[in-house]
């Protein structure tokens, strides 16, 4: 070990870990060829010695800061915790840090955060933009000149993307309701130009078509993923002369708004109204009765996104944009039953 008065070097770390200086260098540079047990041994030596390499100088030499940006609409959405944890762990395993930012669902904010990450020489970005990417915004993303992985978005086509198969889950959910006798099924989801909303609407319509039925277009509302929209639209629908017999909350953060509207009308679930949520959550599991969900594995999305981004960083230009579709399933629970009246 170096004396307290001298400056520690990677040679000191190599000696303490019983490896070569080249191995220490590869660990510091997050080289994927280092075995996990060797990586842990080197990291333990770094921690015990208190070795702190000059990250800025090192990034200038290797053109990397080992930092990945992740921009989410709201960082306090509980359903995204699994995604963040899985992405963090996958990146941390190879020496990358994950920086999470909150866009508040505003395109201007998204652009500001992306510019900031680019100026700080982030090696890549994971983003699920709340507004469609087109025109000037798409040109702006291209000009950033850093790898981008889209989360649950399919545009722009030149970027890598990890998406949930929302059409698959929605076909199963709506089909289940129709087979129980429901005909007036309301779908409340986000702006129709965004992939999740567009695919949910496709699955919804395909379930009706598969049974030779026609949905009422007035029951499809593609406006916003926010809880407030879920409350307002559900309240309005339930106040109609011929209200829906089932409501599908087509956004991971909308269920609370839908349930508040149902409670405000004094309706019982599922006796008066069947309810289905999108995305696994404690709210859906713990409320009485438990709410049926169209769900997918957020942790799997995080792991895949991190892996795709690391691969793009190491092999930029080696392949065309890739798309990974994560399975989506319908889980029936006590919030779903037959309609209380003929439709």
Image: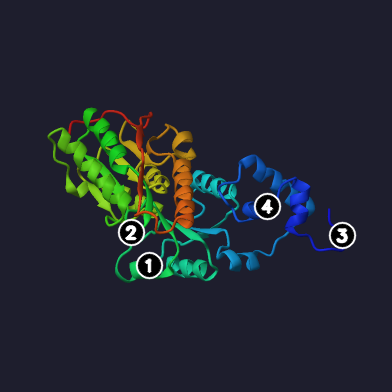
Along the polypeptide, which appears first: circle 4 or circle 3?
Answer: 3
Viewer-nearest of discs 4 and 1: 4
Q: Secondary structure at mark 3?
A: loop
Number of other residues with Cα within 10 Å of mark 3, as a class: few under 14, some 14 to 19, many 20 or more: few
Count numbered badges in the picture: 4
Residue 26 in view: yes
Q: CA distance from mark 3 to mark 2?
A: 52 Å
Judging by the rendered image, the residue that carries numbered circle 3 is: 4
For the point 47% across and 70% down, which residue is it? 115
> 52 or 31: nearer the eye?
31
> 97 or 99: nearer the eye?
97
Judging by the rendered image, the residue that carries numbered circle 2 is: 158
Along the polypeptide, which appears first: circle 2 or circle 4?
Answer: 4
Viewer-nearest of discs 4 and 3: 4
Along the polypeptide, which appears first: circle 4 or circle 1?
Answer: 4
Q: Position of residue 47 (x, y in %)?
A: 74, 51
Q: CA distance from mark 1 to mark 2?
A: 9 Å
Task: State if disc 3 and disc 1 touch (CB < 8 Å).
Answer: no
Along the polypeptide, which appears first: circle 1 or circle 3?
Answer: 3
Instruction: State the quadrant of the C terminus.
Output: top left
Q: Which mark is residue 142?
A: 1
């Amino acid at each position: 070990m170096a004396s307290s008065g001298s400056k520690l070097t990677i040679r000191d770390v190599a000696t303490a870990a019983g490896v070569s200086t080249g191995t220490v260098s590869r660990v510091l540079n997050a080289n994927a060829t280092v075995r996990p047990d060797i990586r842990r041994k080197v990291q333990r030596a770094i921690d015990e010695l208190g070795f702190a390499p000059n990250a800025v100088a090192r990034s200038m030499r290797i053109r990397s800061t080992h930092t990945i940006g992740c921009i989410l609409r709201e960082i306090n959405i509980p359903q995204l915790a699994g995604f963040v944890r899985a992405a963090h762990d996958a990146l941390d395993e190879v020496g990358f840090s994950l920086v999470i930012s909150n866009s508040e669902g505003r395109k201007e904010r998204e652009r500001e955060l992306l510019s900031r990450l680019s100026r700080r020489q982030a090696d890549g970005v994971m983003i699920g933009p709340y507004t469609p990417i087109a025109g000037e915004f798409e040109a702006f993303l291209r000009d950033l000149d850093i790898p981008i992985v889209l989360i649950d978005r399919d545009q722009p086509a030149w970027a890598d993307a990890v998406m949930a198969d929302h059409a698959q889950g929605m076909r199963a959910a709506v089909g289940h309701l129709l087979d129980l006798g429901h005909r007036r099924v309301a779908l409340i989801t986000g702006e129709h130009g965004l992939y999740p909303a567009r695919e949910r609407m496709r699955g919804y319509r395909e379930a009706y078509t598969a049974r030779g039925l026609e949905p009422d277009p007035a029951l499809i509302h593609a406006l916003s993923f926010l809880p407030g929209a879920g409350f307002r639209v559900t309240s309005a629908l339930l106040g109609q002369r011929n209200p829906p017999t089932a409501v599908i909350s087509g956004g991971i953060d909308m269920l609370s708004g839908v349930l508040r509207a149902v409670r405000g009308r004094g309706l019982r679930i599922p006796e008066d109204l069947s309810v289905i949520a999108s995305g696994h959550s404690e709210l859906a599991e713990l409320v009485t009765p438990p709410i049926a969900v169209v769900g997918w594995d957020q942790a799997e999305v995080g792991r895949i996104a991190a892996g795709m981004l690391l691969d793009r960083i190491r092999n930029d230009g080696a392949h065309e944009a890739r798309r990974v579709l994560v399975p989506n399933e319908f889980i029936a629970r006590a919030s779903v039953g037959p309609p209380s009246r003929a439709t």
